[in-house]
Image (tube, rainbow, N blue to C red):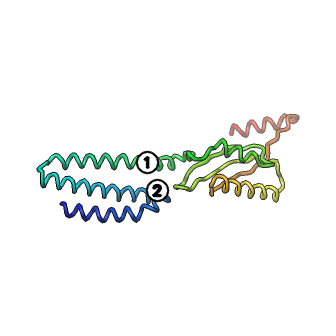
Amino acid sequence: MLITAIGGLAVNSLNAFLLHNDRHQDLNLQGAFLHMVADAVSSVGVIGAAIAVGFFHWNWADGAISLSVALLIGIGAIPIIRQSCNILLEKTPPHLDAEQIQAHLQSFLGVKAVDRLHLWTIALGQEVLFAELIVEIREGEERDRLLTEIQASIREQYGIQEIILQMTAPVTVNLSQPGILLGVISNEMI
């Protein structure tokens, strides 16, 4: 048991060392790294239990060390579980301020309002921005120029690479024609 645990410690330590530098790039690599660390810690626990039982006849040490290792692994898994839940629930990344980004979008000349702003993470380091921009510019080339300018600014300022912007013109309702208002209300109800 002792020899097998020493071999397991060597192999798992090597694997953890190889995964260490790349673990921040991907949640799967982070999970694999944690798994290798947990296996290495388990091997240390088995080595300790083998010594305690073999030399001191402390049979209780095996169970106590196993529970300690399981508790340590459980505590170490909490950050990965939290990050996975945040991705699955499409929560706004904590380092991005939605109000600040909305104000930044509204600061562009021609943007009248920002609606339905949504920020979420699809993988570690890969955030997505979706927003509906109500713009006063009706000409195609000017709108394209504004879109390109906004996307470049968001990428540079906030590091968001996936940007989905829908541009629409402001809706105007002529109240002098009573049938139009009724038509707008009935369309909303359908």
Q: Secondary structure at mark 2?
A: helix
Quadrant where the N terminus is found in the figure = bottom left
* Residue holding disc 2: 27
Q: Is residue 14 left or right of residue 150?
A: left
Work out whether 185 lies above or below 97.
above
x then y, percent, for residue 5: 23, 61
Quarter occupied by residue 17: bottom left
Q: Residue at x 77, y 38 (%)?
A: 184
Name which residue type carries label 1.
Pro
Q: Nearer the viewer, residue 172 or 104?
A: 104
Quarter occupied by residue 155: bottom right
Task: Return the mark for residue 98.
Answer: none
Residue farthest front in this picture: 55
Q: Is residue 4 left or right of residue 173?
A: left
Query: Contact (CB < 8 A) between labels 1 and 2?
Result: no
Q: Residues within 10 Å of mark 2 (few under 14, many from 20)?
A: some
Q: Secondary structure at mark 1?
A: helix
Work out whether 126 lies above or below 61.
below
* Residue holding disc 1: 79
| Mark 1 to mark 2 CA distance (whole Å) | 11 Å
Name which residue type carries label 2.
Leu
x then y, percent, for residue 28: 44, 58
Q: Is residue 183 left or right of residue 50?
A: right
x then y, percent, for residue 50: 17, 55
x then y, percent, for residue 104: 71, 46
Quadrant where the C terminus is found in the figure = top right
Q: Residue at x 57, y 45 (%)?
A: 92
Q: Residues within 10 Å of mark 1 (few under 14, many from 20)?
A: few
Q: Nearer the viewer, residue 133 or 53?
A: 53
Work out whether 82 lies above or below 139.
above
Q: N-terminal of the two: label 1 or label 2?
A: 2
